[in-house]
């Protein structure tokens, strides 16, 4: 599980500067298998298929998170897979 900070969605309309308020970022959480890990990015896949055959394993929904945006990483116990 990776907790990370992302930018807020851009505001779509014109506003007077005094009406913008205090900007804030968005706290996010992504859960999945760590499929790529280097000094700049970590990629997590929440979905995995073909788990009974290592030669045909597939992943989907992969998200890549910049390391500089990561607040916390929690290692979760992998569930036992039915064989």
Image (cartoon, rainbow, N blue to C red):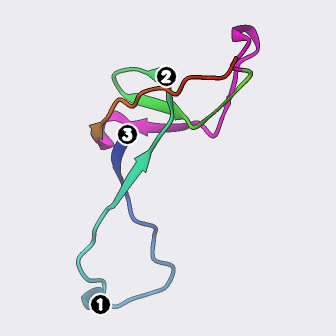
Q: Dot 1 corresponds to which residue?
A: 19
Q: Tell whether label 1 touches label 2 (CB within 8 Å).
A: no
State the image coordinates of residue 68 (x, y, percent, origin top left).
29, 38
For label 1, count other residues whose C-alpha is less than 10 Å away and answer few (under 14), some (14-19) or many (20+): few
User: Is residue 27 or residue 75 the one in the foreground?
Assistant: 75
Name the element at disc 2.
strand
| Vertical order, 64 against 81 (above or below) | below
- Disc with the residue nearer the chain's start (3 vs 1): 3
Examine the structure image and report whether residue 23 is included in the region drawn in magenta.
no
Residue at horizontal 45 percent and vertical 67 percent from the top: 9
| Number of the front mark, 3 or 1 | 3
Q: Dot 3 corresponds to which residue?
A: 2
| Number of the front mark, 2 or 1 | 2
| Horizontal relation, residue 56 to residue 7: left or right | right
| Horizontal relation, residue 33 to residue 72: left or right | right
Q: Tell whether label 1 touches label 3 (CB within 8 Å).
A: no
Q: Dot 2 corresponds to which residue?
A: 36
Residues at marks 3 and 2, CA–CA distance in whole angstroms: 13 Å
Name the element at disc 3.
strand
Examine the structure image and report whether residue 62 is included in the region drawn in magenta.
yes
Residue at horizontal 31 percent and vertical 62 percent from the top: 25
| Vertical order, 38 against 24 (above or below) | above
- Disc with the residue nearer the chain's start (2 vs 1): 1
| Number of the front mark, 3 or 2 | 3
Residues at marks 2 and 1, CA–CA distance in whole angstroms: 41 Å
User: Is residue 67 or residue 60 the one in the foreground?
Assistant: 60
Please identify the quadrant where the N terminus is shown: top left
Residue segment shown in magenta: 51-71
Residues at marks 3 and 1, CA–CA distance in whole angstroms: 33 Å
User: Is residue 20 or residue 27 the one in the foreground?
Assistant: 27
């Amino acid at each position: 599980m990776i907790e990370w900070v992302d930018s807020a969605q851009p505001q779509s309309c014109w506003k007077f500067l005094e009406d913008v308020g205090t900007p804030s970022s968005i706290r996010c959480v992504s859960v999945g298998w760590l499929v790529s890990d280097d000094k700049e990015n970590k990629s997590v896949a929440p979905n995995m298929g073909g788990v009974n055959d290592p030669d045909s394993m597939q992943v989907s929904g992969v998200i890549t998170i910049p390391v500089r945006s990561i607040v916390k990483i929690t290692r979760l116990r992998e569930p036992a897979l039915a064989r």
